[in-house]
Image (cartoon, coloured by chain):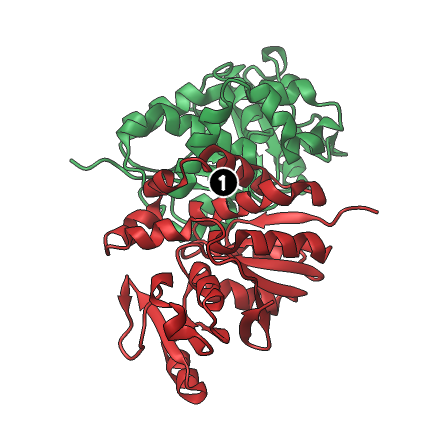
Chain colours: A red, B green
């Protein structure tokens, strides 16, 4: 039996190049949406509702009595209760609760994947690397590792996570895709110096100026929140 | 005085993310359009006219008494005289002549760059790496290293050439761009084993099945056709 096919998507803008029907799409937004989603669910949140605007965040937050969360430019958005840092969501805060999270890049790709007919959408980040890999191997479907990028621009942190997944599961898939080959090699090149290397990326410079260094280091730490966020009927829940 | 800014574009689909006015756009289509263009001009062609369709190639070829050239799937297109291999264009054939070349990815990006207001368009490939670098350093303008990609998909060979340029000229530019950082690292990783490494790329597999191995190896050889193709009024000419 032939193996399922795996591709790496480097920017949401390139999504329609790929046939994603019958595929699992892994939405990757390492700094920091998908790292925060994994952490909140790992710490016992009942669900995370990803929304693309502040207005929806407030509206849905009120309706479901959820914790509203979101940042722009490193600051909590006016009208919301919390920011976009995984460190803000310990069990004491999120246990059993609904988190309504507004992000830009990650949420956008998630909705695009659904609109383009993905069979299944999950989210991936270094904190839940193993859970993602295990699910993809047992899923036996084609896979799109979807980098959320930054305003459609290629970014390294999402690519490195795609590379980490490929490094672990490549023997289970057919991979003829230069994006995947590059992602895997960049991961192999930097897996031992990840916390140092990410300091050279553009996103690090953007966020570190807001004092988020320890957040960013957490976001490239493997398996510290090893849960599988699966999208079901508008919610991300533990799979 | 601040240095000009350099970005690497990984797919034509992402072009409109960048402000390319007042920029030099380097169109890169390593396998094989821009390698062939450099070689034809190096071997004395008066000019190369890049066109996007076979019909235009024949029409313009007739009008200017030029050599018509183009391939699809590794075969010379019916109605045209030659293919898209740099080896087909020795001085004895092209000296003083006009080559009318139809390609898909490279020509498309070239026209997009012009339509988006690029200040200048040149073409780059490993055979003319030094000429490109010298021009960019003396040009003192912002630079877009434009990978033509393959049907909008990221490819490694164009990215490696962008990395080679960055490796040589980075101290003259401001570079805050993960695409450029990745391209440079991939080039550094493979500059010593380039002819071996490109055998792992998707485009190699696509073209090598047509018996084009020696062509592809030529296309990653530095400075064997060190001339600068500059776009002027519809023609690529020696700069």
Q: Quadrant of residue A22?
A: bottom right
Please state the horizontal and vertical placement of residue A135, each as a whole percent of the image.
Answer: 64, 57
Q: Nearer the viewer, residue A154 or B132?
A: A154
How many circles with numbers are drawn on the protein? Answer: 1
Q: Nearer the viewer, residue B195 or B235?
A: B195
Q: Given the current orientation, which residue lies at the most extreme left position?
A: B1
Crowding at dot 1, Cα within 10 Å, few <14 / some 14-19 / many 20+, comes out as many
- What residue is shown at x 49% (from left), y 40% (from top)? B110
Whether residue B26 appears in this view of the structure is no
Q: Secondary structure at mark 1?
A: helix
Q: Quadrant of residue A196?
A: top left
Residue where numbered disc 1 is placed: B110
Tell me the chain of label 1. B
- What residue is shown at x 57% (from left), y 38% (from top)? B155
- In the image: residue A69, left or right of residue A176: left
Please state the horizontal and vertical placement of residue A49, each as a whole percent of the image.
Answer: 48, 75
Q: Given the current orientation, which residue lies at the most extreme bottom position?
A: A63
Please state the horizontal and vertical placement of residue A33, each as a whole percent of the image.
Answer: 42, 62
Q: Given the current orientation, which residue lies at the most extreme right position?
A: A1
Q: Given the current orientation, which residue lies at the most extreme front position?
A: A92
Please state the horizontal and vertical placement of residue A151, each as a whole percent of the image.
Answer: 41, 57
Whether residue B60 appears in this view of the structure is yes
Q: Is residue A233 shown above or below A114?
A: below
Q: Nearer the viewer, residue A126 or B164?
A: A126
- In the image: residue A47, left or right of residue A210: right
Q: Quadrant of the C terminus of chain A?
A: bottom right
Q: Quadrant of residue A19?
A: bottom right
Q: Nearer the viewer, residue A4 or B96?
A: A4
- What residue is shown at x 56% (from left), y 14% (from top)? B95
Q: Is residue B154 shown above or below B160?
A: below
Q: Is residue A123 shown above or below B211?
A: below
């Amino acid at each position: 039996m032939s193996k399922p096919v795996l591709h790496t998507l480097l920017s949401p803008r390139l999504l329609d190049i790929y046939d994603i029907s019958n595929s699992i799409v892994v939405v990757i937004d390492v700094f920091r949406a998908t790292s925060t989603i994994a952490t909140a669910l790992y710490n016992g949140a009942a669900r995370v509702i990803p929304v693309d605007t502040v207005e929806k965040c407030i509206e849905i937050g009120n309706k479901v009595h959820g914790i509203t969360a979101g940042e722009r430019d490193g600051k909590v958005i006016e009208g919301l209760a919390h920011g976009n840092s995984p460190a803000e969501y310990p069990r004491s805060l999120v246990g059993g609760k609904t988190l309504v999270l507004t992000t830009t890049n990650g949420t956008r790709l998630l909705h695009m994947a659904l609109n383009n007919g993905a069979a299944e959408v999950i989210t991936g980040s270094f904190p839940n690397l193993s859970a993602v890999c295990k699910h993809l191997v047992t899923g036996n479907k084609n896979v799109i590792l979807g980098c959320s990028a930054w305003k459609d621009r290629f970014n390294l942190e999402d690519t490195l996570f795609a590379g980490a997944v490929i490094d672990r599961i490549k023997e289970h898939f057919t991979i003829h895709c230069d994006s995947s080959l590059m992602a895997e090699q960049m991961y192999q090149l930097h897996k031992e110096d990840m916390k140092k290397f990410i300091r050279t990326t553009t996103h690090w410079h953007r966020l570190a100026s807001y004092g988020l260094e320890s957040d960013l280091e957490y976001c490239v730490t493997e398996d510290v929140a090893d849960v599988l966020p699966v999208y079901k009927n508008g919610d991300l829940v533990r799979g």
